[in-house]
Image (spheres, helix red, strand yellow):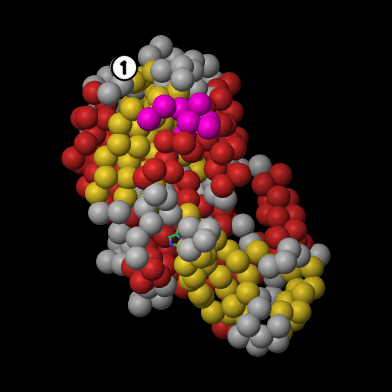
Amino acid sequence: MSMRRFVASGPSEASCRDFAEDVAYSLAQSPRQLPSRYLYDELGSSLFEAICRLPWYRIARIEQSLLRSHANAIFSCLPPVSTVVELGPGSGEKLVTLLGALPARGATVHLVDVSPAALDNAASALAASSSLTVATHHATYEEGLAAIGRSGAAAGQTLVVFLGSNIGNFDPPGTDTLLRGIRAALGPGDALLLGTDLVKPEPELLLAYDDPLGVTAAFNLNLLVRVNRELGGDFDVNQFSHRAVWNAPESRVEMHLVSRSRQRVQVRGSRIDITFEAGESIWTESSYKYRTDDLAPMLGRAGFKVIGQWQEDGFALTLAEAR
Ligand code: AVI
């Protein structure tokens, strides 16, 4: 087994500047916010991997089981695939399962993630099990797709894989934009495999996002640790608590960091000086949950047609062809 591996793009100075500007902009919003993509520094990525092992957070396990059962069926719906692009590969375990059923040898796999730790983990997972060319793109999904497009079209079809209900972390306009961006990077007959968590009873959702071991709380609070370290902030992490809320009208679980007291916080790198009231919260993540009927129209708006769908235990894998 051999794997050729190259890093196609790396972190830019601009991305550090973006972090400082995004923090300044989003903390000034009402309600105050921090973008969820910054949850994934090295520690945040490890905490997310730990979340995926919690009994109360089942997305990764159910999806893995769906992929084990249906990977052959997925590829049998498609013409020969020579390029696989995974957006947000996490540990890479699910991609390994899927690629176990890939009929073509010598395929190229592109991994796109803002977390270098996730890229390393995923590339190592693929190294152990496949004969592939692997390119890692330390980039946002949009930047990664653009870089892959510029690297030139290979013979055969492309399959974009977007698993783990990562799409749920985009608000609806952002979802449409992202899906259209994916479609624009593909040609007719290429495909998208999308993993989505489905709406389920509120107590189940809240346990998944506020677990009894406090791992999700640590994952959320680590965002303040990151702001302190990278941007010279002075958040007192003990003065904030994690809260998960099911917002039924918007069909999303929200994560918040709630100020335990009236307190002043400065972030030098973002030139901000804020007073938080006791009980005031910073909204750090939305995790949208879908109804199966939502998926075909959502994909259709972006130029995809659903050609397969597999469901288990409140989770759906949907295969859609670019029209
Ligand atoms: C990565 N993403 C799909 C996870 C989710 O479920 O929204 C992130 C997460 N947040 C809290 N727990 C897990």
- Give the extent of the magenta segment: 299-306
Whether 301 is among the magenta residues is: yes
Q: Could you say which is closer to the camera, residue 187 or residue 140?
A: 187
Q: Is residue 255 visible?
A: yes
| Relative to 113, 240 lies left or right | right
In which quadrant of the rendered view does residue 322 lie?
Answer: top left
Residue 155 pos. (x, y %): 41, 12
Respond yes or no on whether mark 1 lies under 8 Å from ligand 1. no
In the displayed structure, 258 sits above or below 184; it is below
Q: Is residue 108 above or below residue 298?
A: above
Q: Is residue 110 among what the camera can see?
A: no
Residue under label 1: 79
Kindly give the residue lying farthest to the bottom in the view shown: 261
Q: Where does residue 85 sit, x and y in percent of width and height?
A: 43, 31
Name the one closer to the observer, 30 or 82: 30
The kind of residue tagged 1 is Pro
Q: Quadrant of ligand 1?
A: bottom left
Residue 75 in the figure: left or right of residue 142: left
